[in-house]
Image: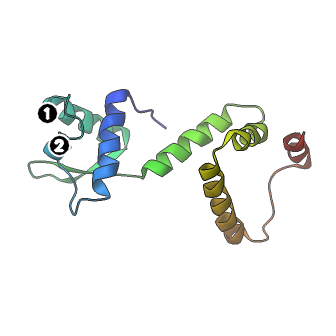
Amino acid sequence: MPRLGPLERAVMDAMWATTTTAPSAPAARDLRHAVPKLAYTTVITVLDRLVDKGFLERVSNDRPHRYRPTGSQASYVAELMHEALAMTRCPMRALAAFVETATPDQLVALSSGLAGRTRRVGRRGSSISLREREEVLI
């Protein structure tokens, strides 16, 4: 997954915030309030790069171009978390360490998400080996 640079992150944060409240897809000029330090041409350039990276799609070919995120902010962060877990030899320990340092609000969100996931997965079982389970418990 491509990473977001600081300017791209500022624009994507604005896009994610705007698309949840706006009735239509925003144009570059609609984002100027969210990233006031950037020149209009810089915003256009960043939007085009975000289209090329797959974070945005252009929803109109008319001028001004309008853009829409291809995924949610939550799905982007979840993908970053998966990448971080894939970088370790023992992702189960990393998850356990995360849980140990999680805030109460994060624990509530995790618990809620796990309860929903458990209901969806049903009795298909786990792909975690007995050894991995033991490592988490250590």
Q: Residue at x 88, y 44 (%)?
A: 137
Residue denoted by label 2: 28
- The structure residue drawn at horizontal position 19% and vertical position 41%, both measured from the top left corner, is 33
Between the residue at mark 1 and the residue at mark 2, the CA separation in whole angstroms equals 7 Å
Q: Residue furthest front?
A: 104
Q: Position of residue 123 (x, y in %)?
A: 79, 71
> Which residue is painted at 30% across and 44% down in the image?
14
The numbered disc on residue 105 is none
Do residues under tags 1 and 2 come within 8 Å of each other at their CB atoms?
yes
Q: Amino acid at mark 2?
A: Ala
Residue under label 1 = 40
With respect to residue 10, does 77 lie above or below?
below
Q: Secondary structure at mark 1?
A: helix
SS state under label 2? helix
Question: Percent from the top left, x then y, of residue 11?
Answer: 29, 38
Q: Of callouts 1 and 2, which one flags the residue occurring earlier in the amino acid sequence?
A: 2
Determine whether, in the image, residue 135 is placed left or right of residue 7. Answer: right
Left or right, 131 with respect to 31, comes to right
Q: Residue at x 72, y 42 (%)?
A: 95
x and y percentages locating residue 136 in the rendered image: 84, 42
Quarter of the image where one finds residue 43: top left
Quadrant of image for the C terminus: top right
Towards the viewer: 68 or 37: 37
Q: Residues within 10 Å of mark 2 (few under 14, many from 20)?
A: many
Amino acid type of disc 1? Tyr
